[in-house]
Amino acid sequence: MAVESAKGRPRVPLRDWARYRFDRTLARSTGTLMGWLVITCLAVVVPVSLLLVWTDPGSPTSLSERLIAAWRISAETLRLGAATGTPLRLVLSAVLGLVALLCVSTLVGVITTGLAERMAELSRGRSTVLEHGHVLVLGWSDQVTTVVGELVAARAPRRPRAIVLLADRDKAEMEEVLAARGAPTARARIICRSGPASDPDVLALVSPRSASTVVVLPSAEPTADAEVLRILLALRAVLGEDTDGPPVLAAVRDDRYRAPARLAAGPRGTVLETETVTARLIAQCVGRPGLSLVLRDLLDFAGDEFHLADTTAFHHGPFGQTLLSHPNSCVVGLLTPEGRTLLNPPTDTVVRPGSRLIVLARDDVSTRVEDCGHLVDASAIVAARPDPADPSRLLLLGWNRRAPLVLDQLRSTAHPGSVVDVVADSAVPGPREPEGGEPAGPDVRFRSAPLSRPETLLGLDLDPYDAVVVLGPDRGDGPGHPDDWTLVTLLAVRLLEQRTGRETRVVTELVDDRNRPLAPVNSGSDVIVSGMLIGLLTAQIAQNRHLAPVFEELFSAEGNNVCLRPAGAYIHPGAESAFAGVVAAARDRGECAIGYRRHDVVRTGPGDHGIRLNPPKSERRVWHAEDQVVVVATDRHHLPTVAAGPDESATAVSPQAH
């Protein structure tokens, strides 16, 4: 049925017209809504009550008595009272029932509204956190899932009871991302709160004073470092000037913010410079194939990690004695009573009372002391001899904000006579001029070429190069994900290898760890997932802030680093020896051996790629010349004194004609 207007307007269906009138009535006021509810109830209850009375064989015969019976049924149904008698008594009973119904309905409405508002507040993540000894993570970045996942994966008693995450994102969205990335929630509570961490009032809701550690992560925004500084200042405002507050670990990207961040973090603060750490990792991997896999295993809580061990059994003795006195852990340094970290100190360094050993172990129980000297076979040890320092020729493809830092690191680690050819899409600045007294660094030569075109990549001649470094663009520099260009470039390099039949060692950086299995590289290459490694490093220092100087030195261009050396430099090829013999040979060279890499499982082995860190000193095997020993050692070389400028290098790198 439709309704037609008198002026010939289009017909409107009766159902739509009734719904429209009903919606207009409801939109007027709450009283109108209540009136409609009363009318609807009476329209249903009264006719049904009359029908029940008239169809009941035992109902009264007179009309008045039947109406009274119908009233009683309606009143009981609507909870209006069931009194009978005079009209005044009926009216008073109805009024009393209406008042009771109004009060009960109001109470139910208030409770329902309050619960709904509270649930909405909880879903927004603005409620107070009353935890003690929790790890507080402030900010959201690519590393947050790695940091949270590693903290949860830590072994007891190092695992925190709760991890509280405060970021200016939706609470449900944060929980969904953490769950999608596989952060286990059964081993520790993960509590997400939403709000700006730079607001002291919001920051106070997550109980920073009672936290065991506070971690501040930079976002991917251009103003991330400034936001980290504001968060540290807000934390300072909440905690006050109390030096007994929780340790603070903050990460910044730009070196210019490192000093202000240290001041804002206070005396118990540690500041990581993520861009410099990433550049150091890339530069170190150039000359040490497989290093990225070793560092990933070293930083992962799933394997062995650094611990602090007691030195009572070695007081006033030489440090070298400790290297063969731990059957299930590897000693790498000392923490002095003054808090100074000595990584791979000279073997004659005296272990003073109050010092602690820095050891690589599975857990604290594995650091027991037992002499392993009887496991050393001196006849299998190779006499120490100096390593050759051959120059290398490197090709760097691509340019981003970390590229100048990578070149600076190569300046400090390159062998004499080394050359670095840089090919980028657009013009790049020339090499930084060495400061007074600073070595000039390798010969750096630049060329601009359209690397986004496949024919340019396929026209490169890789034969003269010992290694290729591939750096993807920064976020926002172009369409698509930064890893897209990197994967295309790696694919082109792989095609060139197949064309020439010669494998080229590649060092590349990826942003997303999920793209690492997609990287088309050979077994001698290193794929650095910078965000994941920075997250692993952050989690390690968050668990033990005394390890910050250890990793600072390991990732620096100077001092002691993690190196992979040929096993033939320690044990005669083909000889059978326990790992204790490798430790003794490394000790004679001024190094600390912490593991090895087997050559026969690098290509076809399991996910560990043949790497074994912290093997028992009693583990015996036949050593081959192609095996590698993982050591903590210095890797210093004299540096070249010639640096070419951009103009001089215009023809240094020439892709083949295409």
Image: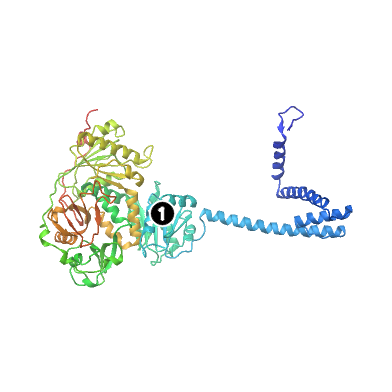
Residue sitting nearer the eye, 252 or 282: 282
Q: Report if residue 367 is visible in the image.
A: yes
Picture quadrant where residue 271 is located: bottom left
Picture quadrant where residue 428 is located: top left
In the image, residue 63 sits, relative to residue 470, either above or below, namely below
Local crowd at mark 1 within 10 Å, few (<14), some, or many (≥20)?
many
Q: Report if residue 338 is visible in the image.
A: no
Q: How many marks?
A: 1
Going by the numbered disc 1, the residue's amino acid type is Ala
Residue sitting nearer the eye, 527 or 576: 576
Q: Which residue is mark 1?
A: 183
Query: In this image, 525 relative to 50: left or right?
Result: left
Q: Which element carries disc 1, helix, strand or loop?
A: loop
Residue found at the far right of this picture? 62
Find residue 608 and report its horizontal and vertical position in percent.
28, 51
Query: In this image, 71 relative to 215: left or right?
Result: right
Find residue 205 and report its horizontal and vertical position in percent.
49, 60
Query: In this image, 320 relative to 494: left or right?
Result: left
Quadrant location of the C terminus in the rendered image: top left
